[in-house]
Amino acid sequence: MSLLILSPKVGYLPCKFLIQIHHAFCNKLHLGNHIFRNNMELMNNLFLELINFVIESVNPIIRLLKSLIHVLETFVYLLEALIYVLKSLIHVLETFVYLLKTLIHVLKSLIHVLETFVYLLKFRVQSLI
């Protein structure tokens, strides 16, 4: 198929130049589609590489966070154990204080008994004189 062009001097003429431009344009368009397709594939590959990079970057962070959680859970467990030990120590100290108070009370009673005994002995000695 030939393209015809209206020329003011010669009338209608087949124009190989227009045909060449048409073919060149079609070839460029085809090449452009090919380049576009290649660019899309490249962009898809880059996007997939970016996703893989993010996944590979996030996985160590997730492992680190899991380790941190484990450390924190262990720390909480140790704090609970320390609280239990401190409560037990407080209970032992309270018992010790109670025993000291009881000992003080017993000693006061013993002193009172001894004072009474001494008083009775004085009274007995005075009655013998």
Image (tube, rainbow, N blue to C red):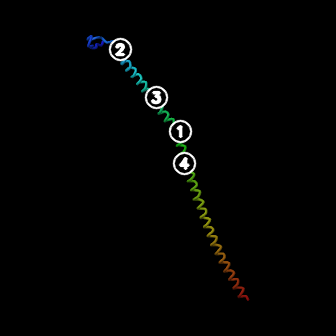
Q: Residue furthest right?
A: 129
In the picture of the structure, the residue carrying the numbered disc 2 is 20
Comparing marks 2 and 3, which lies closer to the viewer?
A: 2
Among numbered discs 4 and 2, the one appearing first in the sequence: 2
In the picture of the structure, the residue carrying the numbered disc 4 is 72
Q: CA distance from mark 2 to mark 3?
A: 36 Å
Percent across and percent down for residue 101 are 61, 70
Disc 2 residue type (three-letter):
Gln
- Graded by Cα atoms within 10 Å as few (under 14), some (14 to 19) or many (20 or more), the crowding at tag 4 reads few
User: Are dots 1 and 4 in contact, CB under 8 Å?
Assistant: no
User: Are dots 4 and 2 in contact, CB under 8 Å?
Assistant: no
Q: Which mark is residue 45?
A: 3
Among numbered discs 2 and 3, the one appearing first in the sequence: 2
In the picture of the structure, the residue carrying the numbered disc 1 is 60
Give the residue displayed 52% in from the left and 40% down from the top: 61
User: Are dots 3 and 4 in contact, CB under 8 Å?
Assistant: no
Percent across and percent down for residue 105 are 62, 72
Image position of 99 (left or right of 10): right
Q: CA distance from mark 4 to mark 2?
A: 76 Å
- Graded by Cα atoms within 10 Å as few (under 14), some (14 to 19) or many (20 or more), the crowding at tag 1 reads few
